[in-house]
Amino acid sequence: MARICEDLLFPLNRPADEEGCHWKGGAVATPAGFTGAYATFTEAGWTALTADPEFGGAGLPKLLGFAMEEMVSAANLSFSTYPLLTAGAVNALARHGSPELRARFLPNMVQGVWSGTMCLTEPQCGTDLGLITTRAAPRDGGSYRIDGTKIFVTSGEHDLTENIIHLVLARLPGAPTGTHGISLFLVPKFLVGDEGAPAERNGVVCSSIEKKMGIQGSSTCVLNFEGAVGYLVGEPNRGVRCMFTMMNDARLGVGMQGLGLAQVAYHNAREYARIRLQGRALRGPAFPEQPADPLIVHPDVRRMLLRTKCMVEGMRALAYWVGYHLDLSEHHPDPAARQEGADLVALMTPIVKAFFTDQGFEAANLCVQIHGGHGYIRETGVEQYVRDSRIAQIWEGTNGVQALDLVGRKLPMHNGRLLRRFFHPVAEFLDAHADDPHLGELVALEAKAFGRLQQATATIAERSLRDPEEAGAVATDYLRLFALTAVGFMWLRMAEKARDRLVEAGALPGKIRGGGSSAGVPAATAIADPAPAIVSERNVAFYQAKLTTARFFFTKVLPETSGLLATIMTGAAPVMALDAADF
Ligand SMILES: Cc1cc2nc3c(=O)[nH]c(=O)nc-3n(C[C@H](O)[C@H](O)[C@H](O)COP(=O)(O)OP(=O)(O)OC[C@H]3O[C@@H](n4cnc5c(N)ncnc54)[C@H](O)[C@@H]3O)c2cc1C
């Protein structure tokens, strides 16, 4: 994957941004190099990495898929959109499609020979899916006729695959209004004959592609469905539920896009801060033999770098923790452990999507700031990250909508059961480590943030019973408070590992505690600590840097939770008081 990213995808990132996609007569050409890169990507088996072996997938853990998505997004976000949507469509179809549809479409989608899309958005219908007007009417033989227009369809038309499989939300005749009257249909670009090969062209046409702020290499299409043949996926009028399978997968994937962008922005900023000479260190020249010191000596530059570094590493740990639970939810032999895994993933999905993508954009901004004016001009290439990262805060449900999902659906679900999947392991860890001689100070800071999160949760739960606007008005602040506390939990666990390795190496006094950090892992599957590694000098520096970065997070970033709690406690009134006419 590293070779594909470094040698193939990253070198195409900037040229694709310059060139964009081309629309002509309903066909879309992706930027130069994309077809070859996509062929290499699929031939190497990457689209099949985590898919079910029943349909030709490699069946590897979803956690590995997360790692791959971060790398691909960091190398070339536009490119990442093609396989990401296909993976989501594969999962939705695998879970809700009939055996016949699965057999006919999934193997080629898993191999990446055919790609997938999700078609929800219409001109009058974005966040509010209840406004969908695309129509579906039964045809002889069990298929449906689909008519309507979808906009903003990512990968809706392109030249990377021989067929494109659209998953389309539409209304059946006489269906109830709102989201309870929407069904999901599979609409292939080319109808697939009995022998499984694409045959006749279906009635779906790309009438244009959008000009947009970033991700120029990703085709964003207007699709007209005119008497297109579609096949029902799942039950009639349950389409939104089926589509949520795809959206939830995609939301985690979009979170990884945010992390990937944050990561690549950080890399660029760090390298630049090491070589750009400006000014002198405040305590006197750090490199007197040079005409000036590198940017990295300046406290304000270090602040920006460390902020990004601690977020990237903390978010990556959180992503892997969620990915691990996703795997448990699907494969653990014990149904109770599967349920626990699923609960945690459901709880964390809006947090991963919204917080990671906010951080991706913030990291890209800080990267430009560290580059100064050279970041603002195109030559250094980092302004592209600001433009590219911005979409991730919007698609798959805006970040505001993710926050509403967290407070409005996930918190009250099953009387707070989902919440307990996070609260319990954190509380356990804090209890077990309160007196830890190396981590105690960090544990105390996390305990404060956790206390704030508990207070905010109880307050929102209580107030929103009286008035739902109480939850809506503070949802974004609450999601951020939650995310920071979750990242703090990950940093504690990383700090614990780093401490253990340093003790092992004799670089820190003390004894290693038994048990490893299995918090949050069901007992049946707790991972034993690996045999003690030989801790090299380089690793000692690595683990020391982990502890130092952890300290930065807990002392300079996590205290934001105090301000967030304060704004949450003031409730909805200050937000709702101003008359609409007075804005
Ligand atoms: C490049 C690109 C690619 C896309 N790819 C796809 C795709 O592949 N498939 C697809 O179906 N769609 C796609 N979209 C559409 C995308 O998912 C929507 O733009 C997004 O869901 C928001 O809908 P909207 O743009 O209509 O904004 P609106 O729904 O009009 O929202 C505008 C603002 O109001 C807020 N808002 C709206 N309703 C509420 C509410 N109830 N409570 C609080 N705040 C609210 C939103 O958070 C947002 O800030 C894509 C969009 C873009 C730009």
Image: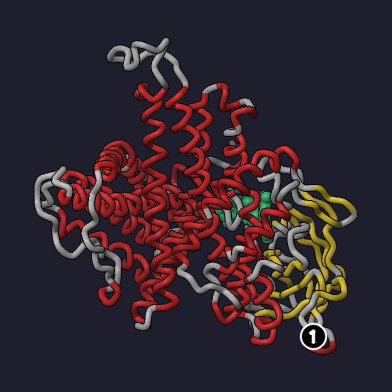
Q: Residue furthest right?
A: 25
Compare residues 178 and 34 and report the one nearer the observer: 34
Above or below: residue 389 compared with residue 128: above
* Location of mark 1 (residue): 194
Which quadrant of the rendered structure holds the C terminus? top right
At horizontal 34% and vertical 11% (from top left) the residue drawn is 288
How far across and down, in percent of the image, does residue 389 sit? 57, 44
Q: Residue at x 24, y 42 (%)?
A: 537
Residue type for callout 1 = Asp
Residue 492 in view: yes
At 60% from the left edge and 33% from the top edge, which residue is drawn?
381
Q: How many marks?
A: 1
Query: Element at badge 1?
Result: loop
Q: Is residue 554 visible?
A: no
| Horizontal arrangement in the rendering, residue 124 relative to residue 556 (left or right) | right
Mark 1 near ligand 1 (CB under 8 Å)?
A: no
Residue at 17% across, 44% down = 441
User: How many neighbours does mark 1 have within 10 angstroms: few (below 14), some (14-19), or many (20 or more)?
Assistant: few
- 260 displayed left or right of 301: right
Q: Residue furthest bottom?
A: 141
Q: Position of residue 11 (x, y in %)?
A: 63, 42
The picture quadrant where one finds residue 230 is bottom right
Which of the colour schemes (rainbow, by chain, secondary structure, one colour) is used?
Answer: secondary structure
Taking the image as shown, residue 112 lies to the left or right of residue 564, namely right
Q: Position of residue 406 (x, y in %)?
A: 45, 60
Percent across and percent down for residue 542 are 29, 43
